[in-house]
Amino acid sequence: MSGALRPPAPERPPRRVDCAGRSARDVLEAVLPECLEARSQGARALIRVDNLELLSDSVTRLLKAFDRLSADLGAEIRLADSSGFAGAFLEALSDRAHVSRARGGRA
């Protein structure tokens, strides 16, 4: 049944990552193991990123990395951000973005 549709991957409980005072690399190192584990189990990782405006590094670099990570590993990354950075990033990508704004969050 090569043409049969596969059911959506089960969603794991959300993992919250706080960006306050952290480098982009630190945040990615916190998120990557969760995404890889979910992928190995056939599940979908759900990552909620908070305090993006308090990142002590390039927000653009982190957002691009999240978008690639989401596309490559099937992780669902939701951005909670009151600064407007995430919104501007998502607007610029339009419908090509693989990350989204957190519902009920500050984004």
Image (cartoon, rainbow, N blue to C red):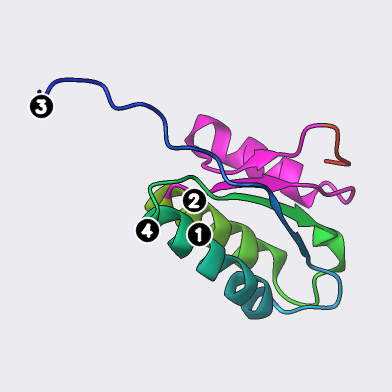
Question: Mark 3 falls on what kind of element?
Answer: loop
User: Which labelled disc corresponds to residue 2?
Assistant: 3
As drawn, is 1 to the left or to the right of 87?
A: left
Question: Quick one: 39 or 92, which is closer to the camera?
Answer: 39
User: Which labelled disc corresponds to residue 40?
Assistant: 4
Question: Quick one: 5 or 74, which is closer to the camera?
Answer: 5
The residue depicted at 68 percent of the width and 44 percent of the height is 78
Which range of residues does the magenta coloring cover? 74-103
* Amino acid on which disc 4 is placed: Ser
Identify residue for label 1: 35
The residue depicted at 82 percent of the width and 41 percent of the height is 107
In whole angstroms, how far apart are the C-alphas of marks 4 and 2?
A: 15 Å
Disc 1: CA contacts within 10 A as few (<14), some (14-19) or many (>=20): many
Question: Quick one: 51 or 1, which is closer to the camera?
Answer: 1
How many numbered circles does the render carry? 4
Question: Quick one: 88 or 65, which is closer to the camera?
Answer: 65
As drawn, is 50 to the left or to the right of 14?
A: right
* Amino acid on which disc 2 is placed: Ser
> Against 99, is 69 above or below?
below
